[in-house]
Image (tube, rainbow, N blue to C red):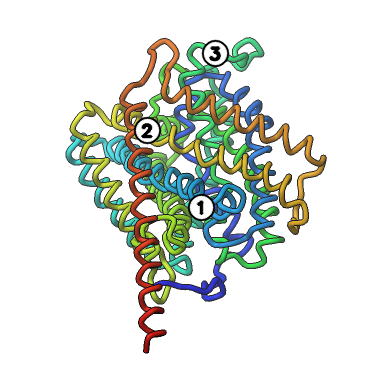
């Protein structure tokens, strides 16, 4: 049930799909609440890390993605220069992060549902909803991108609508009311003590330009469309984050921003005084709920295709390489992700006392793992520049090897700092549940890789045996 030929995959993703897919993956509504909690200094962080991190990682992705536009994306890129074992480790971290992060996303969605409909949801009810959405995401992934791509496409458009309302609503509100926060140079100067607590979430909201390359074999004209989509997406992402964060801070004091429910509170303040305001807020709230689901669907589509390619090539267990015979959807990787997602929901649901606790536990755990493949990507980019000088690069970052070295060092430094701050919160100390979870997840990954290597040895032995029998005959 696998597709062995690269050309057998349908070319379903055009330029519009790439941009919308990438925006859907990177722009996270939940990130706005966390960023706004930092106060006006969040504006500084968006701009500073937009320049020092978002632009470098976008440039790196555009170059490598056009040089190697193959199904599997980041897995293929790392394997090219570091070999099968490191590629397998990277793709495991990439995949398992999404499987663990997915339930945190649906916990956030539950917070929106409760706030929007003014109801109380117990932890048990939240977990039930999360499990339902988890397996609906799996189903969507299995049916293939020809149909599935419309979920991230619609989700990205709805995000743009919501962000536009936050931006212009904040401007209109600020012209007629007293500002909830002062946007002075002093207020926008970073407060490193409190800001460091939420800074990792800002960084988390800037990753994902490489995701669509997981479906590299399904992209039309990737050499031309990938760099264009990356740069257009980067511009949209940074502008939307900066202006929408400011929009929230215009109406809600930084100390009162609810990380889970801040968006609904802001929309209510913007629209409460206009005719039909409650209905509009309800409609926009439903749109926000859909964007949460679409965000999860987008990441599973990219990650499962990356893991699926590794499974086909024997770097992950063969289960991961099981694909739909007609649509090419990564059946094995998607089902495995559904199982891990469900397990994480059930386990963390036993210890969390509230939706915020559950959200932070799951997100912090997955985020540390999430940084690791990107460190591998940056190192692969630099080594590829050094050892594969003659590789055709339709897009190449100007400045030669010195610029490539600087971009790599900056990117790795920021990724490492982000991982550290997720596992060590200033003022609170080490987050042992996060650290232990990361160690366990990576250890499981080593076992998974050993299983896949054992499978390869068994297949080789059977192949040799068949050849020996055929020779004797």
Left or right of 90, for residue 442: left
Kindly identify the residue that appears in the image at 68 percent across and 38 percent down.
55
Residue at 70% across, 50% down = 63
Q: Residue at x 59, y 28 (%)?
A: 414
Q: Nearer the viewer, residue 161 or 419?
A: 419
Of callouts 3 and 1, the N-terminal one: 1
* Position of residue 296 measured from the top left corner of the image (x, y, whole percent): 40, 49
- Dot 2 alpha-carbon crowd within 10 angstroms: few under 14, some 14 to 19, many 20 or more: many
The image's mark for residue 84 is 1
Identify the mark nearer the N-term, 3 or 2: 3
Give me the disc on residue 1: none
Name the residue at the front extreme: 472
Outermost right residue? 399
Where is mark 2, residue-wise? 438
Disc on res. 192: 3
Viewer-side residue, 153 vs 26: 26
How far across and down, in percent of the image, does residue 395 sit? 75, 53
Q: Count neighbours of disc 1 (C-alpha within 10 A) and say few if under 14, some if 14 to 19, many if 20 or more.
A: some
Q: Quadrant of the N terminus?
A: bottom left
Query: Which image quarter holds the C terminus?
Result: bottom left
């Amino acid at each position: 049930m696998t597709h062995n030929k690269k050309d057998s995959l349908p070319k379903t993703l055009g330029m519009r799909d790439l941009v919308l897919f990438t925006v859907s993956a990177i722009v996270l509504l939940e990130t706005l609440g966390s960023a706004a909690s930092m106060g006006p200094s969040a504006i500084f962080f968006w701009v500073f890390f937009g320049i020092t991190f978002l632009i470098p990682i976008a440039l790196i992705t555009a170059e490598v993605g056009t040089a190697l536009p193959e199904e599997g994306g980041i897995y293929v890129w790392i394997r090219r220069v570091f070999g099968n074992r490191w590629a397998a480790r990277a793709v495991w971290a990439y995949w398992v992060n999404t499987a663990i992060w997915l339930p945190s996303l649906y916990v956030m969605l539950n917070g929106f549902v409760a706030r929007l409909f003014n109801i109380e949801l117990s932890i048990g009810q939240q977990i039930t909803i999360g499990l339902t959405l988890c397996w609906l995401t799996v189903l969507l992934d299995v049916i293939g991108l020809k149909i599935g791509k419309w979920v991230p496409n619609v989700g990205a458009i709805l995000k743009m609508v919501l962000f536009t309302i936050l931006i212009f609503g904040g401007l209109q509100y600020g012209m007629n009311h007293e500002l909830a926060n002062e946007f002075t140079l002093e207020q926008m100067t970073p407060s490193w003590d409190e800001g460091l607590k939420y800074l990792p979430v800002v960084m988390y909201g800037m990753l994902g330009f490489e995701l669509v390359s997981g479906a590299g074999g399904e992209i039309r004209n990737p050499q031309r469309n990938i760099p264009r989509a990356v740069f257009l997406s980067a511009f949209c992402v940074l502008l939307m984050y900066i202006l929408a964060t400011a929009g929230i801070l215009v109406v809600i004091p930084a100390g009162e921003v609810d990380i889970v429910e801040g968006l609904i509170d802001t929309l209510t303040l913007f629209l409460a005084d206009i005719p039909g305001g409650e209905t509009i807020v309800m409609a926009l709230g439903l749109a926000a709920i859909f964007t949460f689901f679409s965000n999860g669907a987008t990441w599973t589509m990219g990650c499962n295709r990356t893991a699926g390619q590794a499974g086909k090539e024997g770097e992950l267990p063969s289960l991961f390489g099981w694909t739909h015979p007609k649509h090419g959807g990564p059946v094995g990787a998607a089902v495995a992700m559904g199982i891990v997602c469900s397990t994480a929901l059930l386990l963390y649901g036993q210890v969390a006392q509230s939706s915020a606790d559950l959200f932070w536990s799951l997100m912090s755990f997955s985020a540390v793992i999430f940084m690791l493949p990107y460190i591998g990507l940056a190192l692969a980019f630099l080594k590829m520049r050094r050892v594969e000088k003659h590789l055709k690069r339709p897009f190449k970052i100007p400045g030669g090897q010195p610029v490539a070295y600087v971009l790599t060092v900056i990117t790795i430094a920021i990724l490492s700092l982000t991982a550290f701050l997720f596992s060590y919160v200033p003022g609170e100390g080490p987050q042992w549940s996060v650290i232990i979870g990361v160690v366990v997840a990576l250890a499981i990954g080593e076992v998974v890789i050993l299983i896949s290597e054992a499978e390869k040895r068994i297949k080789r032995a059977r192949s040799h045996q068949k050849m020996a029998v055929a020779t004797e005959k």
